[in-house]
Amino acid sequence: MKKSKKHIIIDIIFILIYAIYWESISTEFWIYDRRIYGYFIFNRFPLSLLVFWAFVFFISLYISETLYKKLTKKTEIPLFDKKLYLLDIIAFGLMGTILEALTYRWNWFEYGVNLHWTFVPIINLPINAIMGYFGIGALIPTTVRFYRSKVCK
Amino acid sequence: MQKPEIFIIIFFLIYFFFPIRSWVVKKGEIIAVIIFAFFLPITIQPVWDYNHSQWTLFIFGVPVFFTLYWIALVFFSINISDFVLKISSKKFSGIKLHWLNLLTDTFSFCLIGTLCECIFHSLKSYDYIKGTELGFIPILNVPLILPLGYIGMGIFAAHTFRIKRKEKII
């Protein structure tokens, strides 16, 4: 199997594990509009959210890795580099926030009651959700690359 | 100083002096995790209702000592995981090291994190506003979401911290 194909398969497996894990434990914090979504996994979260996470991950990884290659004029993506790390955080933070803002504006979900979220004006999202996406960018892509490097060795 | 804060200081000292390692390594660990340790409690702050009589210092509605707790928790768990890996790698030589490391990470984060949460809970440091839907663990009486959250950290974040620590040292 080609290296790039293996990369994609590892990315998909990792993203699916992450998405199922995250959505399973965090359902309590959001209320999904059941008229909009179709099938619910374990009757807890919509199947389409797996597509959402795959989209966020693939686009963000693509943006950060492409920008890194262009900025540093390198052809290979290292396991860790400070510039790449910063690009990961920015790409995930921005992509996640944009998609979350759009889906929230379209009333695809609501934030759980009782939680004292502080909303950011204009984009109308809780600051915690935005910080969460930047946090994902700081933690997950490096782990994805770690497993890529180990499995594709 | 209140009981949970004393517990965090003791936990931090245990982490800091065990296992014995150079100051450079310790510095690398702290640098690698400090931003995460500061922002994580603030990000997940709405989930908890902190008992104000049990904490003295707050920043953005979160007890300041939690930053110290997360620094200690992350690298204490990683160090324990590495120690367990060292012992078990000879026994399980058939399994690739990174998969074995995944198991030891999951185990150590879950065990240490849940134990600390039990102590916080017994000291009445906070109540849970959310996170109880999955139910409680019998005897320990803490929400099931907590060990699951720590398992997630072991799976998805441990290697990032390890790599960051290495980069800082080199």
Image: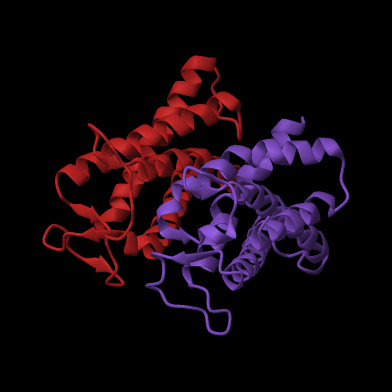
Chain colours: A red, B purple
Residue beneath the point at 44% across and 44% down:
A8
In the picture provided, is A2 more to the left or to the right than A96? Answer: right
Q: Quadrant of the N terminus of chain B?
A: bottom right
**x, y percent for residue A45:** 28, 63
Specify whether residue A135 is in view: yes
Residue beneath the point at 79% across and 53% down:
B13
- Is A84 or A126 nearer to us in this picture? A126
* Depicted A5 relative to depicted A87: above or below: below
* Depicted A88 relative to depicted A71: above or below: below
Residue beneath the point at 36% across and 41% down:
A127
In the picture provided, is A97 more to the left or to the right than A147? Answer: left
Specify whether residue A2 is in view: no
- Is B85 or A105 nearer to us in this picture? A105
- Is B68 or B145 nearer to us in this picture? B68
- Is A71 or B19 nearer to us in this picture? B19
Farthest left residue in view: A35
Q: Quadrant of the C terminus of chain B?
A: top right
State the image quarter where residue B169 is shown. top right
In the picture provided, is A36 more to the left or to the right than A139? Answer: left
In the picture provided, is A23 more to the left or to the right than B4? Answer: left
State the image quarter where residue B94 is shown. bottom right
**x, y percent for residue B28:** 74, 36
**x, y percent for residue B147:** 55, 67
**x, y percent for residue A133:** 40, 41
